[in-house]
Amino acid sequence: VEVRSMGLAEHYDHFADEFIVEPFPFWRALREEEPVARSELYGGFYVITRYEDIREAASDYERFSSREGATIPPLPFLALTDVDPPEQREYRRIMNSGFTAEAVSRQEPQVRELAREVVGTLVGRAEFDAHHDLGLKLAPQVTLAYVGFKRGDWPVLINGIEDVARLRGSDPEVGLQAAAAVMGVCAKLVQQRREGEPKGDVVDLILQGELHGTKLNDEQVLRMLGTLLLGAVDTTATAIASSVYYLATRPEKQLYLREHGVSKKAVEEMLRWSSPVQALGRVVTRDTELGGCPLAKDDRVMLLWASGNRQESVFKDADEMDFERDSNPHLTFGHGAHKCVGLNLGRLMLRVALEELLAWTEHFKLGDPAKVTWAGGEVRSPEHVPVRASWT
Ligand code: HEM
């Protein structure tokens, strides 16, 4: 069956306010009426909104390749996300051991210490911002420490990563400058670490790693680090900020977590609902079809993980969090070959951030809702989440 193009998504722009503040009704309409819809922006791409179509494309890298990058428009310096298996598997093998469930859980005490430090700075304040003061403090600090960056380098990296993620759509020039600044810090680190003693962290795994029997060159190392930083920071900060936002507006859900603790199911549900990486791209390698719609070689598609995560036929009552949801095959970490390397670390940071915030407060609620604004790009996140807490 050929789906007639109706043009609902003709102006779809994942960076534009119009599509990021409250995209859910629009995505629902696309899922129901035009699940493979064409946007004319950024050189043209197809917007894929149905859960099953997203999974199909993400599972089949031979038809839907990452070779032109997973972002629209593309970022020039990423490694893993821009290559297909089998090469991509070689890259992943290098860092996999640093991100196993076991390796990550060994770091829980350090993560908790940083979380206490961050939440500690908020205690007593009449209002704090769950994105800037919590998510964007904790996620980069934990990630940068975990990977192997020194504290002194954190501020430049944190600002740079934010600018790359947010300003590429509106101000590509600033986006590129920010990317160059981040890469500059990474290059300095690589040079120092090649000369110094190994520390057994992720940087060492990358420096010691081999592709086809040869150590990675500087450019490959930088691309690996770039992928890690861009993959980890904004995403996790967003998961934290979005989840706090939700709980700040749903007292009964907050109470549930206070009484039952932040269970595994609760973490998965916060991840599904917040879906920080709203969308990523692929390129079509040969004439094919998806969701009943013909696609041609070289067409670009955008997989809307965040839309799949709200599909009612897969997740009943999808717009609300259900901390007892039994089956939760969400797409928050992607699907298929590129499924997130850092998912255990992301889950850990989210859980610990929430546990600490809940422990230090009796309850919290949203401040002025008019102050809540949203930012787009691959990551859709609340920019400001004013929260008023009653501290213990
Ligand atoms: C809640 C937090 C996170 C979310 C929502 C998230 C989401 C994702 C998604 C959707 C992908 C798939 C990319 C694709 O299909 O092209 C991905 C890949 C990746 N993520 Fe995460 N991520 C999170 C946390 C992290 C953390 C903490 C790290 C590292 C410390 C990380 C590192 C990566 C890397 C390196 C890839 C590339 C994997 C590949 O292409 O093979 N992520 N992530």
Image (spheres, rainbow, N blue to C red):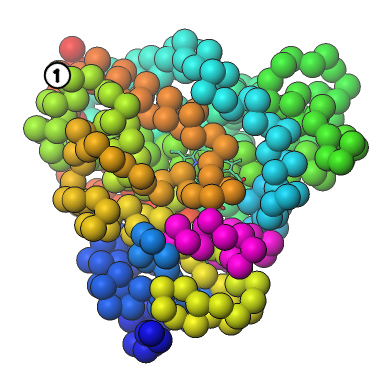
Q: As drawn, is 176 to the left or to the right of 306?
A: right
Which residue is outermost to the left? 252
Q: Is residue 24 above or below residue 133?
A: below
Highlighted magenta segment, given as a residue range:
54-73
Residue 353 percent location from the top left of the image: 36, 24
Nearest the eye: 43 or 339? 339
Query: Magenta span has 58?
Result: yes
Picture residue at 31% right of the left edge, 73% below the top: 30
Quarter of the image with the N terminus is: bottom left
Quarter of the image with the C terminus is: top left
Mark 1 lies on residue = 259
Give the class, few, some or many, for how many residues have Cα within 10 Å of label 1's Cα (few <14, many ≥20): few
Q: As drawn, is 60 to the left or to the right of 267?
A: right
Nearest the eye: 170 or 141? 141
Residue 46 percent location from the top left of the image: 47, 75
Residue 98 percent location from the top left of the image: 64, 25
**Quarter-of-image position of residue 368:** top left
Picture residue at 27% right of the left edge, 23% below the top: 262
Which residue is outermost to the front? 1
Report if the beta carbon of the residue with label 1 is closer than 8 angstroms to ligand 1. no
Nearest the eye: 279 or 127? 279
Q: Is residue 63 above or below residue 136?
A: below
Q: Is residue 361 above or below residue 229?
A: above
Residue 161 percent location from the top left of the image: 57, 44
Q: Amino acid at mark 1?
A: Glu
Q: Secondary structure at mark 1?
A: helix
Q: Is residue 375 visible?
A: no
